[in-house]
Structures are given as C-alpha cells and as structure tokens.
Amino acid sequence: MGNVGVQIICLALGVFGLIGVIVCCIVPRWKVSSFVGSNIVTAQSTEDGLWMSCVVQSTGQQQCKTYDSILVLPSDLQAARAMVVVSCMFCCLSLLILLFGANFTTCIESESAKPKISLVAGVGLLLGGLLVIIPVSWSANTVVQNFNNPLVPQKMELGACIFVGWAAGVLLLLAGGLLCCFSRPQSGGSGGTAHFTNSTGVVNKAYA
C-alpha cells in the first residue's frame, strides 16, 4: 500500500492533463492573427482551431464557422485532429484502468494484478501525452516558419491552445512516468522452499 500516494498524485495529474487536452480539442485558439507591420490597428482578428475558425471584431463580437472541408486545413491541423482525439481516448481509458487497479480501490481483489494494471494505465498516459505534444509542437513549428517567411501575407501567432497542449502533455507524461516507475510487480519472496522426505520419514525443508 506504499504506492497509494503516488497513484493519487498520478490520478490528479492525469485528470488535469485530460482537461487540458479537451480544451485544446474544443477551443479554437491554435493560431491567432498577428498585428505586425504597418497595419497596427485592425478591425478584426482571426482565430483558428481544430474544428472551426472564428473572426473577432474590434467591438468584441465573435463569429465562428466550422470548416467546410477537412481538405482546406493545413497538414498540421489535419493530423492534430486525429492525434488529439486519440489522446483524449487514451487518457480517459487509462484513468479508468487506474481507478480499477489502484491500491485505494477494491474493484480488483488480486494484489498481484494491481501493479500490472497500474503499469498499463501508466503506458496509456504516456501515449496520451505524446499524442498531444506532437501536434501542438508541429503546429507551433509551422506558425513560426510562416511568421518568418516574407512570402506569407497573413501572419499568425501561437494561440493559447498551443501552450495549454504543452502543459497537458507534460502532466500526462509525468503521471505516466511515475506510474511506470512505481507499479512494478513485486517479487514473490527471497527464495523458494523445497520439501523432501528422508529415509526415516521425517519431512525436512530446504531454503533456496
């Protein structure tokens, strides 16, 4: 039961990481308009997300529209859609597995199976963290390259979801790494015991 505290911390980190991944998936702030150049004052700004693009007026009004086709999206956002959704699935499934196999729950009675179940949950959280860090890093690299490219007329900057995705990925990797380190199956003992009967019929024990 010494790993109860670690498992509770990992569960909390996983929940916060899952919330961050959901925010990245829903909120359309992966790329935002950059106010650089001669046009310092603009009447509107653009915010792009995985599922929709929003136009924010200078008066505060916001209009959002879903993308007409996935083919109009750049390659980084196309891949980010699939990776972020799969990351959400991995995180949800891993947290459920952790709850069932944790030492502070009684869903599974076998003490020898609990470390293995927690290890599976840790691997799932690691995969979930990688699947969210990869697309946000890819999108960030694309935004930086386009920003420094003089041939791109409309400059975009990193949105809030990029930073939220990095933070969520780090939390998931930390939770998964801790689970993998502290969920190793314990050995059965220091040695085996062999039973044998001598010529007098007395049962003796020999320790390996």
Image: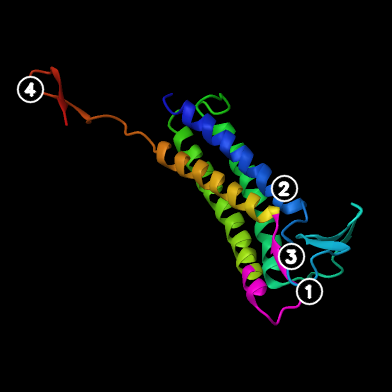
First in sequence: mark 4 vs mark 3: 3
Report the span colored magenta: 144-159
The quarter of the rendered structure image containing the N terminus is top left
Residue designated by label 4: 199
At label 4, the amino acid type is Ser
**In whole angstroms, how far apart are the C-alphas of marks 3 and 1?**
24 Å
Q: Nearer the viewer, mark 3 or mark 1?
A: 3
Give residue 42's position: percent from left, percent from top: 85, 64
Q: Reading the chain from its start, which is encountered first: label 2 or label 4?
A: 2
Instruction: Specify whether 115 is left or right of 192.
Output: right
Identity of the amino acid at label 1?
A: Leu
Dot 3 crowding, Cα within 10 Å, few <14, some 14–19, many 20+:
some
In percent of width and height, residue 10 lies at: 53, 36
Secondary element at tag 2: helix
User: Residue under circle 2?
Assistant: 23
Q: Which mark is residue 34?
A: 3
- Label 2 or label 3, whichever lies nearer to me, is 3
Q: Which mark is residue 71?
A: 1
From the viewer's side, name the closer residue of 133 and 85: 133
